[in-house]
Amino acid sequence: MRPVSSPRAWPWTVRPAPFWWGLAAVGAIAALAMMLARMPWAQGAGLSALTLAILLGIGLGNTLFPSVADRTAAGVDFSKSTLLRLGIVLYGFRITFQQIAEVGMAGLVIDMVVVASIFGLAVGLGTRVFKLDRETSMLIGAGSAICGAAAVMAAEPVVRAQAHKVSVAVATVVVFGTVGMFLYPVLYPYLGFSEHAYGVFAGSTIHEVAQVVVAGKAISETAASAAVIEKMLRVMLLAPFLLLLSSHLRRSTDSANESSTGAAKICIPWFAVLFIAVSAFNSLHLLPEAWVACIVQIDTVLLATAMAALGLRTQVSAIRQAGMKPLLLAAVLFCILVGGGWALNAGVNSLL
């Protein structure tokens, strides 16, 4: 007699239950963070869904999560790795190459100088002056130089840092980005900038996109528009930054073996390449605006989910062990962003 074949397994039954429980847990945290981010108090404070997601994750990760970690770990780790990379790729739908033209070559030059100098100073000061490990210094540098928490998360797969180091870096850029969000409008009357120039200054030096929006709108819609465009241009530098960082880290890691293996291989972060490709595709405006808005919303869910997963995997004791040094490094970088950024923007404006 022919044996009865077992029912065919559907794709969603391939993974074990712990995976789905973990995915559901971080998804619920992300949903709560996105809901809270829409509250007036959160918008007024410049708290994005990403920031709230990691804060909620850390809170639950140090209270409830340890008791269910064995049953949810697979889904949580999948979220902070695979979903993070997918989120960075889809982040390209927030950017178009036309935005470069709107701020001009001057805006691009300002952003390139800011990214290169701040990251270089972060690594140099962090490792030599504050005696921090290289991974923490790089993550704080990436967050301060480019786009806050999103840049820290994007750099994590390249740097391969531990969860608590990522959380420390995110915390520092959130703190000083928030300070900048409130400080810049107060400084505006003393900067000697037009509304447009102020927007470029804010977009080129404030950490998070949400914080840039708040700082710009506090002056005018003209300032807010220039700030967001300049900030998005700065975000676009994330992909080449990751490629260069990956190449540098791989060369330094493989230098001892070059004599036997030949030239060091470059580990290309393909999600960064796809990020550029998606940005280029988005620049063609082939998709309806409603579709793009939907994709951006999905991307926010993915990034918030990754943040929640990172928070669940972060122990407060590990952050406490990091001490004040990461905060001091971030404070120095913030002062350089404000002072040096003002001088850079003023110098560029005087040449135009």
Image: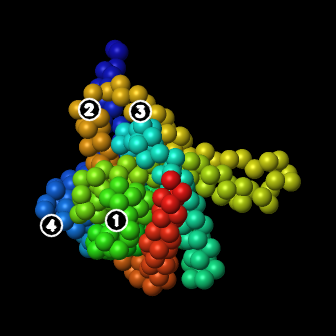
Amino acid on which the number 1 mark rests in the picture:
Gly
Q: Gap in Å between the C-alphas at discs 4 and 3?
A: 34 Å
Residue 134 in the image, given as x and y percentages of width and height: 59, 70
Q: For the image shown, how many numbered marks are present on the structure?
A: 4
Which circle's residue, 2 or 3, is located before the other in the chain?
A: 3
Quarter location, residue 52 = bottom left
Q: Is residue 31 left or right of residue 200?
A: left
Residue position for label 4: 41
Identify residue type, mark 4.
Trp
Q: Mark 3 or mark 1, which has the lower sequence index?
A: 3
Is 216 located above or below residue 93 in the figure? below
| Looking at the image, residue 284 lies above or below residue 189 | above
Disc on res. 283? 3
Which residue bears the numbered disc 2?
289
Disc 2 and disc 3: Cα gap in Å? 12 Å
- Identify which residue is drawn at 85% across, 51% down: 260
Q: Is residue 284 something that shows in the picture?
A: yes
